[in-house]
Image: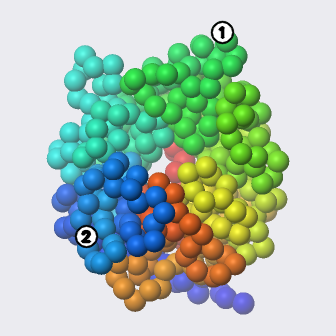
Amino acid sequence: MTTDRQYMTDKKQVVRQNIDWFLRSGIMRPSDGFWGVAERILLTEGHTDLARVNSFFPCQTQIAPGLVVLEHRRADCNFEVALAFDWASEMLGDPSLKSIADTLIDFLVHRTFMRQVDPGNPAAGLWGWAMQHNSTTYWTDDNAWVITCLFILGRRARPNLIPLAIAAARTLRLQILPYYEQLDREGKNTEIPRPLMYGVNLSPHWLGLATLAFAHASVADPQTDYRDVVEPYYRLAPSGPPLSLSRQRKPTSTGLPWTLSEYGYLALAGSIAAQQFNQPLISDTARMAADVLVSHQSPNGHYAAEHDEAPIAPHLADMIYTQNWATLGLYHAWKLFGDERYRTSFESSLDFLARIQDCTPNPIFAGCWRGMYDTQSGHWGGGDQFEGGARSLYSGWTNAPIAWSFLFDRFEQGLFAV
């Protein structure tokens, strides 16, 4: 049986190895963050959807035979990595990591032009998807993470970021409100076809994450009423997607209305929104989602992959859309409710993630989590898709948020708004 001290030391080593992967792999060049961090490293050999990847992500740098960096700089990925480095600087006692976080933030604010700065533009304050690929395409999930990271980093001695976060949150709210009005009128539409904002639908991946951002915004911007976009979500989302969207999706492994990926998001965003808005409906939703995660976790700690942008199978662990968010969801549910079942499941997931952290000697892989793990073979694998699968090594969405879980476990921090 390990002692608490041994347990903490193990988690510290996991974080150190992951930080070293960012510094050595080639995903962040230069490694001080001056030109940001790329979305992912891609293994091209054997990739089954490579033609589509190449057509959509043409900005690439080959760093080794069969290995390229997809060079587009995403706002959400960069902010997530900045936050990981900022927290890791404390855990590891390494001030240079905070300096890298500051450089990443400076890159985002001053060298990307992803933020819409025209006050007359209806997207004013929002952040575009990627610097090299149509930076005026705005997504709800990406902006939710950007806003959340901006608020947290702003509270960590960077007050100049708070106005940027408020501006983005106010515009995001205005873009979402018409969706609820249309649902109330028609009761059937799954997504408003809007040229400005993509991902305006009831999926926890999309509007669920937005409620996380609005929880933070409501603290810093009390004169704006964010409840009008948060409370309708938790009134509508627990029952699952609208019928027209359900018909487009494959059946879930659990028979429940959402995939395990979505319940991970719902536990995460719901716990944070419940803590801030103090609404029983939100708390009940967060508990329900966390209960689903507890009851459908495999004995080895992983969750079945069933997100439609990744290979789907019960023995596959998806690090881009499922395992990462379920782990964070369980942590925040445990911190909010104090239910030891959530703590036990969270620790089981952490143990699984620590066991499978890449130990390949090659610095391009050492210390990372790849996109998909095959628990039957005990190796990275299981297939690939356009954006998901084993051959995609993401900076944000996978490595930074998984590192957050280990950092939170060590320092008892989190993504709560206060």
Q: Nearer the viewer, residue 127 or 290?
A: 127
Q: Which residue is mark 2?
A: 62
The structure residue drawn at horizontal position 70% and vertical position 16%, both measured from the top left corner, is 187
Q: Position of residue 180 (x, y in %)?
A: 60, 19
Look at label 1 and name its amino acid. Answer: Arg
Q: Which residue is mark 1?
A: 185
Q: Position of residue 400 (x, y in %)?
A: 44, 62
Marks 2 and 1, the one that precedes in the sequence? 2
Pick out the residue farthest to the top: 185
Tell me the tag on residue 240: none
Secondary structure of residue under mark 2: strand
Foreground disc of the pair 2, 1: 2
Q: Is residue 10 above or below residue 276?
A: below
Neighbor class of circle 1 (other Cα within 10 Å; few <14, some 14-19, many 20+) is few
Q: Nearer the viewer, residue 148 or 360?
A: 360
Secondary structure of residue under mark 1: helix
Residue 161 sits in which quadrant? Answer: top left
Residue 181 sits in which quadrant? Answer: top right
Q: Is residue 410 left or right of residue 175?
A: right
Label 2 vs label 1: CA separation?
51 Å
Looking at the image, can residue 43 be seen? Answer: yes
Q: Is residue 115 left or right of residue 19?
A: left
Q: Position of residue 230 (x, y in %)?
A: 60, 28
